[in-house]
Image: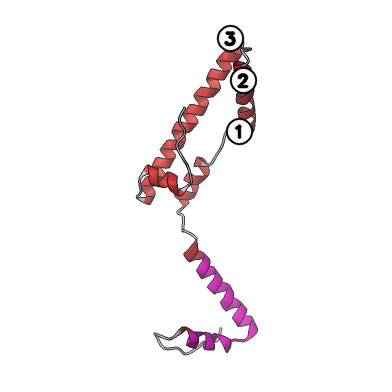
Amino acid sequence: MPTISIQSEIPLETLLHGVAQLDTNHLEQFTRQVLALRAQRRAPHLSHREVELLQQINEGLPTPMQSRLQELVEQQQEGGLTAETQQELLTLIAEVEERDALRLTLLGELAQLRGVSLREVMAQLGLRPTYA
């Protein structure tokens, strides 16, 4: 790659004049590197653990479980649950509560990693508490 002689503190205009001297291939390479630098600065850098936590936090209920839960809730509202389906509903509700508790624990760990409160990390992620 060609080199350009520049002073340690230069006006932007001088830098652009130096860049203008690059041939097309080197200008394209330089542009890609500048765009990559801009992307790094704009996007927050997430640690591997933060990525893992975010994936787990955003994991929803499996579709079959969500569908069955919805079906049982509708049946309950219509008053048509048998003792067996009532127990199935209670089991699904317990599992949802366990998942919610785990999600809260993961949010707490993420908050700790980021050095902010749980409320702040929830705001960063656009999450609001739900109340039953």
Q: Say which residue appears at 55% left-offset and 39% top-offset.
A: 59
Label pair 3/1, CB-CB below 8 angstroms: no
Q: Is residue 27 above or below residue 90?
A: below
Color scheme of the displayed model: secondary structure
Three-letter amino acid code of the residue under disc 3: Ala
Query: For residue 62, which numbered disc appears in the image?
Result: 1
Report, in whole angstroms, how far the alpha carbon at label 3 lies from the one at label 1.
Answer: 24 Å
Asked if residue 56 lies left or right of residue 72, the reply is left
Report, in whole angstroms, how far the alpha carbon at label 2 lies from the one at label 1.
Answer: 16 Å
Q: Say which residue appears at 46% left-offset and 58% top-offset.
A: 45
Residue 73 at x, y percent in the picture: 59, 21
Three-letter amino acid code of the residue under disc 2: Leu
Q: Is residue 127 located in the magenta-colored stretch of the structure?
A: no
Q: How many marks?
A: 3
Dot 1: element:
loop
Q: Is residue 98 above or below residue 39?
A: above
Label pair 3/2, CB-CB below 8 angstroms: no
Q: Earlier in the sequence, mark 2 or mark 1?
A: 1
Q: Say which residue appears at 58% left-offset and 73% top-offset.
A: 32
Instruction: Name the residue beneath numbered marker 2.
Output: 72
Instruction: Name the residue beneath numbered marker 3.
Output: 83
Three-letter amino acid code of the residue under disc 1: Pro
The mark lying in front, picked from 3 and 1, is: 3
Q: Earlier in the sequence, mark 3 or mark 1?
A: 1
Which is more toward the observer, 82 or 56?
A: 82
Dot 2: element:
helix
Q: Which residues are magenta?
A: 13-39
Q: Is residue 124 above or below residue 41?
A: above
Dot 3: element:
helix
Q: Earlier in the sequence, mark 3 or mark 2?
A: 2
Chief SS of the magenta region: helix
